[in-house]
Image (spheres, rainbow, N blue to C red):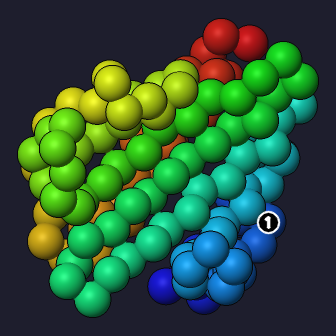
């Protein structure tokens, strides 16, 4: 999965991170964004098909983040979304994600593309 992301012009790097549990960290290219921002997403996938995809932008004056999750919890259905700008648990919304990890990645990438388009339109 990391090599597929690394081949994209929008990706600066894609690396496996071991601390805090194995996950894939994808740093997005600053050229992809209209302003000074660093952006990345991290993917954790578990053997039982639970996952977390956490997207974060870091701006000079703060952060903007969201998260797609599939795991048992007390606050929402197993599939749920933590909306921007804080990805807080209180605001989580029930969701329905595809079974195949490639389709989940496509859904996330489509959402990120919409976010970047919104940033360019605001410019």
Q: Position of residue 122 (x, y in %)?
A: 65, 10
Please give left or right for residue 85 compared with residue 69 in the image.
right
Q: Position of residue 14 (x, y in %)?
A: 69, 76
Q: Residues within 10 Å of mark 1 (few under 14, many from 20)?
A: some
Identify the residue at the far front of this view: 74
Q: Quadrant of the C terminus?
A: top right
**Residue 36 picture quarter:** top right
- Can you tell which quarter of the image residue 75 is in? top left
In the rendered view, tell whether residue 10 sits above or below residue 81: below
Q: Nearer the viewer, residue 118 or 87?
A: 87
Q: Is residue 82 left or right of residue 34?
A: left
- Most foreground residue, 55 or 115: 55
Residue 56 appears in view: yes
**Secondary structure beneath label 1:** strand
Q: Which residue is drawn at the image coordinates 70% and 29% (left, top)?
A: 63
Q: How many marks?
A: 1
Residue position for label 1: 12
Residue under the point 56% across and 35% down: 65
Residue at 62% x, 28% y: name it: 64
Residue 33 to residue 43: above or below: above
Choose top left, top right, bottom left or bottom right for residue 6.
Answer: bottom right
User: Is residue 34 visible from the viewing direction of this image?
Assistant: no
Query: Residue lying furthest top in this view?
Result: 122
Whether residue 11 sits left or right of residue 96 in the image: it is: right
Image location of residue 105, percent across then percent down: 37, 65
Q: Is residue 119 above or below residue 41?
A: above
**Residue at horizontal 21 percent and vertical 31 percent from the top:** 93
């Amino acid at each position: 999965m990391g090599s597929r992301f690394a081949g994209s012009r929008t990706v600066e790097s894609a690396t496996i991170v071991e601390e805090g549990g194995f996950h894939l960290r994808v740093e997005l290219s600053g050229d992809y964004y209209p302003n000074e921002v660093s952006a990345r997403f991290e993917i954790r996938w578990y053997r039982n098909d639970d996952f977390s995809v956490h997207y974060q932008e870091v701006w000079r004056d703060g952060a903007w983040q969201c998260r797609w999750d599939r795991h048992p919890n007390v606050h929402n259905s197993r599939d749920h979304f933590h909306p921007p700008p804080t990805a807080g648990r209180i605001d989580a919304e029930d969701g329905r994600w595809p079974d195949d990890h490639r389709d989940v990645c496509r859904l996330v990438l489509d959402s990120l593309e919409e976010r970047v388009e919104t940033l360019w339109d605001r410019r």
